[in-house]
Image (tube, rainbow, N blue to C red):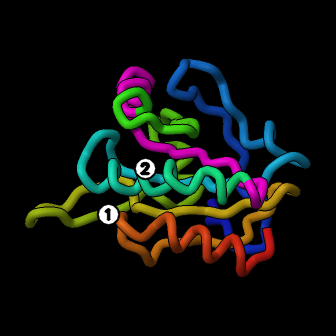
Amino acid sequence: MSLPTTGSPAPGFTLEDNNGAEVSLSDFKGKKNVLVYFYPKAMTPGCTVQAQGLRDIAAELEGHDVAVLGISPDPVKRLAKFVERDALNFQLLSDEDHAVADAYGAWGPKKFMGREFDGILRTSYLIDKEGNLREILNKFKTKDHHEVVLNTVAELGL
Protein backbone atom coordinates (compact mmCIF):
# COMPACT_ATOMS: atom_id res chain seq x y z
CA MET A 1 0.00 0.00 0.00
CA SER A 2 1.41 3.37 -0.96
CA LEU A 3 1.23 6.24 1.48
CA PRO A 4 -0.56 9.45 0.55
CA THR A 5 1.47 12.32 -0.84
CA THR A 6 0.63 15.98 -1.22
CA GLY A 7 -1.43 16.61 -4.34
CA SER A 8 -2.96 13.13 -4.31
CA PRO A 9 -6.48 12.23 -3.15
CA ALA A 10 -6.62 11.70 0.61
CA PRO A 11 -7.51 8.14 1.67
CA GLY A 12 -11.23 7.88 2.34
CA PHE A 13 -12.56 6.61 5.65
CA THR A 14 -15.67 6.18 7.76
CA LEU A 15 -15.27 6.05 11.55
CA GLU A 16 -17.46 6.48 14.63
CA ASP A 17 -17.26 9.85 16.34
CA ASN A 18 -17.43 10.72 20.04
CA ASN A 19 -21.26 10.45 19.87
CA GLY A 20 -21.24 7.05 18.13
CA ALA A 21 -22.29 8.56 14.76
CA GLU A 22 -20.54 7.56 11.55
CA VAL A 23 -18.39 10.26 9.95
CA SER A 24 -16.88 9.91 6.49
CA LEU A 25 -14.25 12.09 4.88
CA SER A 26 -16.54 12.21 1.84
CA ASP A 27 -19.16 14.04 3.99
CA PHE A 28 -17.01 17.17 3.62
CA LYS A 29 -16.27 16.97 -0.11
CA GLY A 30 -17.31 20.15 -1.90
CA LYS A 31 -18.20 21.79 1.43
CA LYS A 32 -15.20 22.10 3.76
CA ASN A 33 -11.44 21.82 3.92
CA VAL A 34 -10.52 19.27 6.56
CA LEU A 35 -7.72 19.03 9.10
CA VAL A 36 -7.29 15.36 9.98
CA TYR A 37 -4.96 15.04 12.93
CA PHE A 38 -3.79 11.80 14.52
CA TYR A 39 -2.98 11.77 18.23
CA PRO A 40 -1.92 8.88 20.49
CA LYS A 41 -4.36 8.91 23.42
CA ALA A 42 -7.26 11.02 24.66
CA MET A 43 -6.88 12.89 27.94
CA THR A 44 -3.10 12.54 28.16
CA PRO A 45 -1.05 15.71 28.75
CA GLY A 46 0.33 16.29 25.23
CA CYS A 47 -2.88 15.31 23.47
CA THR A 48 -4.89 17.58 25.76
CA VAL A 49 -2.66 20.59 25.02
CA GLN A 50 -2.90 19.86 21.28
CA ALA A 51 -6.70 19.51 21.36
CA GLN A 52 -7.18 22.65 23.49
CA GLY A 53 -5.05 24.64 21.04
CA LEU A 54 -7.30 23.59 18.15
CA ARG A 55 -10.40 24.27 20.23
CA ASP A 56 -9.20 27.80 20.91
CA ILE A 57 -8.71 28.67 17.21
CA ALA A 58 -12.06 27.28 16.04
CA ALA A 59 -13.27 30.68 14.82
CA GLU A 60 -10.13 31.26 12.73
CA LEU A 61 -10.36 27.78 11.22
CA GLU A 62 -14.05 28.30 10.47
CA GLY A 63 -13.06 31.49 8.64
CA HIS A 64 -11.00 29.30 6.30
CA ASP A 65 -13.79 26.70 5.97
CA VAL A 66 -11.69 24.14 7.85
CA ALA A 67 -13.37 21.32 9.79
CA VAL A 68 -11.25 19.48 12.38
CA LEU A 69 -11.28 15.72 12.83
CA GLY A 70 -9.09 14.24 15.55
CA ILE A 71 -8.37 10.51 15.16
CA SER A 72 -6.97 8.14 17.79
CA PRO A 73 -7.17 4.44 18.65
CA ASP A 74 -9.35 5.28 21.68
CA PRO A 75 -12.82 3.74 22.06
CA VAL A 76 -15.84 6.00 21.49
CA LYS A 77 -16.64 6.25 25.22
CA ARG A 78 -13.21 7.67 26.02
CA LEU A 79 -13.55 10.20 23.19
CA ALA A 80 -16.90 11.36 24.56
CA LYS A 81 -15.30 11.95 27.98
CA PHE A 82 -12.43 13.91 26.38
CA VAL A 83 -14.84 16.16 24.43
CA GLU A 84 -16.93 16.79 27.54
CA ARG A 85 -14.01 17.32 29.93
CA ASP A 86 -12.21 19.81 27.68
CA ALA A 87 -15.23 21.40 25.96
CA LEU A 88 -13.86 20.41 22.56
CA ASN A 89 -15.74 21.94 19.62
CA PHE A 90 -14.77 19.42 16.93
CA GLN A 91 -15.28 15.73 16.32
CA LEU A 92 -13.01 13.01 17.61
CA LEU A 93 -13.04 9.71 15.71
CA SER A 94 -12.28 6.22 16.98
CA ASP A 95 -9.79 4.16 14.91
CA GLU A 96 -9.37 1.25 17.33
CA ASP A 97 -7.81 -1.09 14.76
CA HIS A 98 -5.62 1.80 13.49
CA ALA A 99 -6.57 0.98 9.87
CA VAL A 100 -7.05 4.65 8.97
CA ALA A 101 -3.80 5.63 10.72
CA ASP A 102 -2.08 2.89 8.68
CA ALA A 103 -3.58 4.20 5.43
CA TYR A 104 -2.26 7.69 6.21
CA GLY A 105 1.17 6.55 7.36
CA ALA A 106 0.45 7.76 10.90
CA TRP A 107 1.07 4.37 12.57
CA GLY A 108 4.52 2.95 13.07
CA PRO A 109 7.49 2.27 15.34
CA LYS A 110 7.99 4.66 18.26
CA LYS A 111 10.35 4.94 21.19
CA PHE A 112 9.17 6.13 24.58
CA MET A 113 10.95 5.89 27.93
CA GLY A 114 13.42 3.34 26.63
CA ARG A 115 10.97 0.96 25.01
CA GLU A 116 9.98 0.44 21.41
CA PHE A 117 6.44 -0.22 20.20
CA ASP A 118 4.07 0.54 17.34
CA GLY A 119 1.75 3.47 17.86
CA ILE A 120 0.34 6.70 16.49
CA LEU A 121 2.89 8.99 14.87
CA ARG A 122 1.56 12.45 15.70
CA THR A 123 0.79 13.80 12.22
CA SER A 124 -1.74 16.21 10.70
CA TYR A 125 -3.11 16.33 7.17
CA LEU A 126 -4.75 19.31 5.46
CA ILE A 127 -7.26 18.19 2.85
CA ASP A 128 -8.97 20.61 0.47
CA LYS A 129 -12.65 20.72 -0.48
CA GLU A 130 -11.98 18.47 -3.48
CA GLY A 131 -10.57 15.76 -1.19
CA ASN A 132 -6.93 16.26 -2.17
CA LEU A 133 -4.13 16.17 0.35
CA ARG A 134 -2.57 19.63 0.40
CA GLU A 135 -0.08 19.37 3.28
CA ILE A 136 1.35 16.85 5.73
CA LEU A 137 2.43 18.34 9.06
CA ASN A 138 4.69 16.35 11.35
CA LYS A 139 7.25 18.91 12.56
CA PHE A 140 5.54 20.61 15.50
CA LYS A 141 5.22 20.52 19.25
CA THR A 142 1.82 19.86 20.82
CA LYS A 143 1.77 23.38 22.32
CA ASP A 144 2.31 25.11 18.94
CA HIS A 145 0.43 22.69 16.67
CA HIS A 146 -2.54 25.06 16.31
CA GLU A 147 -0.23 27.91 15.22
CA VAL A 148 1.48 25.68 12.63
CA VAL A 149 -1.96 24.64 11.33
CA LEU A 150 -3.20 28.24 11.03
CA ASN A 151 -0.03 29.42 9.31
CA THR A 152 -0.16 26.52 6.86
CA VAL A 153 -3.85 27.09 6.09
CA ALA A 154 -3.06 30.75 5.34
CA GLU A 155 -0.02 29.87 3.20
CA LEU A 156 -2.07 27.40 1.16
CA GLY A 157 -4.84 29.93 0.70
CA LEU A 158 -7.48 27.52 1.98
| Residue that carries the numbered disc 1 in the rendered image | 109
**Residue type at tag 2:** Ala
Observer able to see residue 35: yes
Q: Quadrant of residue 83?
A: top left
Question: Looking at the image, is mark 2 or mark 1 earlier in the sequence?
Answer: 2
The x, y position of residue 17, in whole percent, is 56, 28
Q: Residue at x 43, y 43 (%)?
A: 72
Residue sitting nearer the eye, 36 or 9:
36
Crowding around mark 1 (Cα neighbors within 10 Å: few <14, some 14 to 19, many 20+) is few
**Alpha-carbon distance for marks 2 and 1?**
23 Å
- Residue interval drawn in magenta: 63-82
* Residue 99 image label: none
Instruction: Name above or below for residue 73 compared with residue 103.
Output: above
Instruction: Name above or below for residue 15 compared with residue 35.
Output: above
* Residue 51 image label: 2
Residue sitting nearer the eye, 71 or 105:
71
Q: Quadrant of residue 60?
A: bottom right
- Determine whether the residue tagged by mark 2 lies in a helix, strand or loop: helix
Q: Are marks 2 and 1 in contact (CB under 8 Å)?
A: no
Is 9 left, or right, of 153 in this rendering? right
**Residue type at tag 1:** Pro
Is 17 a magenta residue?
A: no
Q: Quadrant of residue 43?
A: top left
